[in-house]
Amino acid sequence: MYIIGNMTFNEVIGQEDIKQRLMQMHREGRMPHAIMLCGPKGCGKMALAMAFACHLLDTSASQHAMLAKMEHPDLHFSFPTIKLPSMGSDHKPISDDFIREWHNMLKSGPYFTMDQWMQEIGAENQQAIITAGESDNLTRKLSLKSSQGGYKVSIIWLPERMNIECANKLLKLLEEPPMHTVFIMACEEPDKLLETIKSRTQRIDVKKIDYESMFKALIEQRAISEEAAKRIARLANGNWQKALEELQAGGENELFLDMFQHVMRLAYMRNIKEIKKWSETIAGFGREKQKRFLEYFLRLIRENFIYNFNNSELVYMTQREEDFAKNFARFINENNILQIYDITNRAIRDIGQNANGKIVFFDLAMQMIVLLLQKK
């Protein structure tokens, strides 16, 4: 188990330029009231946000002790939540409703996914959002004076999951920020945020973790061989969560590969009866897991397309994935790659909008029957 301790920048993998930039802003007194750390999954946005929050708040031994459990009275977390059956019909879920589960997840470290969070709160079949109740609660908290006389820090994880009512209320907070308050947002899809919110934050783009930092962290933190670290660092492609998944034998990606192989073989054989069964199996996954499968599906389509160029430096696949590609890759080519991307992205959109999973996945598989026939 990871012991949180007082989170420092030393615990952030790579991202040296961002660390220096944040500390320099503070050191030179150029602190914006709102920072938005934008970057892909697994790059360490929340790790940076938590480390910077500790840097701002850790001004005495007593504060150091409070930050060791991430329970400092001037540190506020906001994150996507769900409505539990036990909640009243008028209750708008807020982060405080799930703060025990949140702290429990943080014990595993500052790198985590929406999926892990959904599992932590037992809500794999629901869509998690940040409600207007959260912005009301945050407004109340931040209106109070700092309990320790310094900054108040609000960390918002995945602000793009705010509903419109919440977003509009947060905008008012950003337009007239409370005294000595710093908002730090960790965002994966900034395009989904209101333009007015984005315009009132200082955006800092966080890139994928560089290969050398990933390689070094795998050896130092996971005690694996250099050869294994090289393969995983390359496959993870800058995503620490992806690296951790690769370390877990028999993980979710193994299941996803089996499902991908199965549907491609069924599509090739035009076995509609079995395709129907396959789509029903996938529909039994939770929404978040369905979206993860589709993202995996897209990645394998891309890798199989690149495999045709016979340049191993461009291919990022496990041995099992590559073994399948040896015979399958020729079916993914310039005649169908764009159409496959389009229908898969449409499926991701539809699942995100709560469309019927059986219909979405059955339609995707049926279209693959036609597209796989479009050989060079």
Image: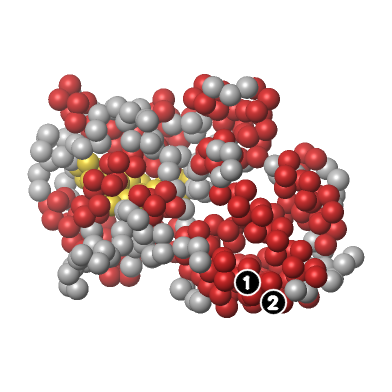
Query: In the image shown, does 303 or 357 lie closer to the viewer?
Result: 357
Expressed as whole percent of the image width and height from the top left, the position of residue 39 reads: 49, 48
Q: Nearer the viewer, residue 313 or 293?
A: 293
Q: Give the side of residue 115 with respect to residue 247, left or right.
A: left
Q: Report the Cα–Cα distance between label 2 and label 1.
A: 7 Å
The N terminus lies in which quarter of the figure? Answer: top left
**Residue depicted at 33% across the width and 39% down the height:** 106
Hey, what amino acid is under mark 1?
Answer: Lys
Query: Which one is in front, 229 or 166?
Result: 229
Residue nearer the viewer, 127 or 56:
127
Label ID, residue 28: none
Residue drawn at x 50%, y 63% is 285
Asked if residue 197 shows in the view, the reply is: no
SS category of the residue bearing label 2: helix
Residue 344 position, x and y percent, is: 63, 67
Q: Position of residue 273 (x, y in %)?
A: 69, 76
Q: Going by the image, does 239 lie left or right of 124?
A: right
Q: Quadrant of residue 225?
A: top right
- Say which element carries label 1: helix
Decide if residue 226 is on the left or right side of residue 115.
right
Quadrant in which residue 53 is drawn? top left
Q: Is residue 77 above or below residue 209?
A: below
Q: Coloured how?
A: secondary structure
Residue at horizontal 56%, vertical 65%?
282
Q: Which residue is mark 1?
A: 277
Q: Measuring from the top left, give residue 118's x and y in whole percent.
A: 38, 54
User: Is the C-beta separation of discs 2 and 1 under 8 Å?
Assistant: yes
Residue type at the position of mark 2: Lys
Q: Which residue is mark 2?
A: 273
